[in-house]
């Protein structure tokens, strides 16, 4: 995914992974709770890809992330 800084690439990609069943609701709820504790509740989907502590604290992606999932058709 390519885009400008702070354009929502990680959030959009994390949301897509969730909507396609690549991550379960319980995990998203966990990310939402943890993000809210840091005052970053809207970052729950970005945290699907942003794993580093520094990424989560600063609200930016520092390292690349790869995510593979399969769908019933492809």
Image (cartoon, grey):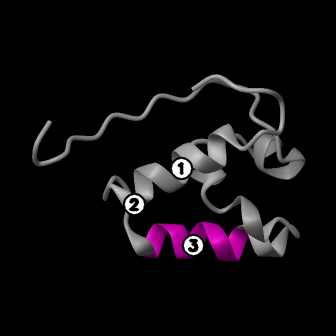
* Residue 27 point in image, percent of width and height: 47, 67
C-alpha separation, residue under disc 3 versus residue under disc 1: 14 Å
Does 9 appear in magenta? no
Q: Which residue lies under the disc numbered 3?
A: 30
The prevailing secondary structure element of the residues shown in magenta is helix
The disc at residue 64 is none
Image point 10% across, 43% down: which residue? 73
Crowd around label 2: few <14 · some 14–19 · many ≥20 (10 Å):
few
C-alpha separation, residue under disc 3 versus residue under disc 2: 16 Å
Image point 57% across, 42% down: which residue? 49
> For residue 23, what is the image quadrant?
bottom left
Magenta stretch in the rendered image? 26-34
The secondary element bearing badge 3 is classed as helix
| First reached walking from the N terminus: tag 3 or tag 2 | 2
Which quarter of the figure is the C terminus placed in? Answer: top left
* Residue 70 point in image, percent of width and height: 21, 41
The disc at residue 14 is 1
Residue 4 sits above or below residue 58 on the image:
above
Image point 77% across, 50% down: which residue? 56
Depth check, front residue: 31 or 70: 70
Is the C-beta separation of discs 3 and 2 under 8 Å? no
Is the C-beta separation of discs 3 and 1 under 8 Å? no
Depth check, front residue: 59 or 16: 16
Left or right: residue 69 compared with residue 72: right
């Amino acid at each position: 995914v390519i885009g400008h800084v702070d354009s929502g690439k990680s959030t959009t990609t994390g949301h897509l992974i969730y909507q396609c069943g690549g991550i379960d609701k319980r995990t998203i709820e966990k990310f939402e709770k943890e993000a809210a504790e840091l005052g970053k509740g809207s970052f729950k989907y970005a945290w699907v890809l942003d794993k580093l502590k520094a990424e989560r604290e600063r609200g930016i992606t520092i390292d690349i992330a790869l995510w593979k999932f399969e769908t019933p058709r492809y």
